Image: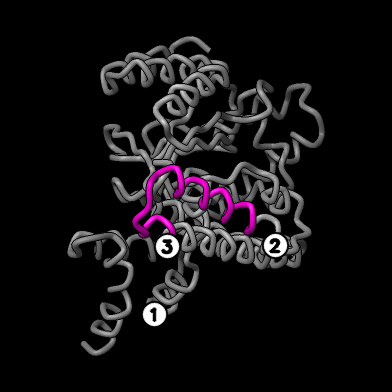
Amino acid sequence: MPGHGWILGLCALLLSSCYSLQQAYWFNNAFNSRMPVAEALQSDLDEAGRKKLLLSREVLKFAAEQGLNVGDAYQHYIAPGPGTVSYLVQAAAADRLELKTWWFPFVGRVPYLGFFDREARDAKAQELRADGLDVSLGTVGAFSSLGWFADPIYDAMTKRRDEDFIELLLHELVHRSFWSKGSAAFNENLAEFGALHLTEIYLKAHRGGVGLSELKNYKEEKEKLSQWIFALRDALKELYSKPMDLEQKLKEKAAIIASFRRERFPELKTPELAAARNREWNNASILGAALYAPDTQRFQKAFDCLRPQRMGDFLEALREAEDEAPTVEEALDSLCSISAEKKGA
């Protein structure tokens, strides 16, 4: 579609690194190939894809009713390309639990780099490994521009199960509605909590509960995997605190990871979660996985204290609390006392 070359120009002005310009170029190409969802529904799209786009209309309406910032998001569709939206690389020190971060305008520091081109991602990963860092590779099912652009629906997103597709859209819309600059772990945890909570409401209200049991099982198994990741992280944290030379530390690190994989990995039936047993576990992948393992009790406690009618109201209260707190984590924890003060007033 002509008339959208400004995307590349804007990114070039805002972001100065070669990495940023490369991603702006790829994003611009993908963005310019988009078509309105209404037009896509009239095309030769297969029936499964058509149903997903129709489902997206329902989810967006629901999200708006829940007070999320829907705006112009997901009003366009990008036809089939790679089997994923983009490619991810993360890196961490080999002998301590410390993710490498990169700084960008508007979002602050983030512990990952995303690429639209797999070869470019893999080249960056090789560069990071050459620096002696642990590296983790992954794919991205969707991403949010945090309201700067009209986020499209990529064809790869429509290949998911309905429950996953619903949660994915809601996850990104929570990002679009609330983003704490420089707090990537908190932002991902909040989006996971919000999306799962909203998906449950949606399935009850719009699908007669169909998919709820699958969602419940998924949440329970994800919690098991999260606890395994946290336990592995804590075991490595204890190791790294001990005074020993680097060679010995790396040797014991490998032994701990092998032991956890062999003896302590939970029994999981959800294929995408069970597959985690065979992934490459290192400091980067452990810390990266922890980004998407929310402390649901902490978020649920704050949510229950406020008892908001809509998720958007909860996010707005969190935004107001963040303005008064030293950190966004403290802002979350302060919501119960704020709620109590309002009730006592």
Q: Do we see residue 90 in this rendering?
A: yes
Name the residue carrying label 2. Answer: 263
The correct choice, above or below, for 36 with respect to 219 in the image is: above
Residue at the image point whose x is 42% and y is 59% from the top? 237
- Magenta-highlighted residues: 239-260
Q: Secondary structure at mark 1?
A: helix
Q: Amino acid at mark 2?
A: Glu
Name the foreground residue: 113 vs 62.
Answer: 113
Image location (x, y in percent) of residue 249: 45, 49
Report the mark closest to the observer, 1 or 2: 2
Secondary element at tag 2: helix
Q: Quadrant of the C terminus?
A: bottom left
Cβ atoms under marks 3 and 1 closer than 8 Å: no
Question: Which residue is tagged 3?
Answer: 238
Image: 20 above or below 296? above
**Magenta-colored stretch includes residue 131:** no
Colour scheme employed for the rendering of this structure: one colour
**Location of mark 1 (residue):** 305
The tag earlier along the polypeptide, 1 or 2, is 2
Neighbours of disc 1 within 10 Å: few (<14), some (14-19), many (20+): some
Q: CA distance from mark 1 to mark 2?
A: 39 Å
Disc 3 or 1, which lies upstream in sequence?
A: 3
Instruction: Answer yes or no: is residue 72 visible.
Output: no
Q: Nearer the viewer, mark 3 or mark 1?
A: 3
Q: Amino acid at mark 3?
A: Glu
Determine if the magenta segment contains residue 241.
yes
Q: Residue 138: x and y, percent? A: 57, 36
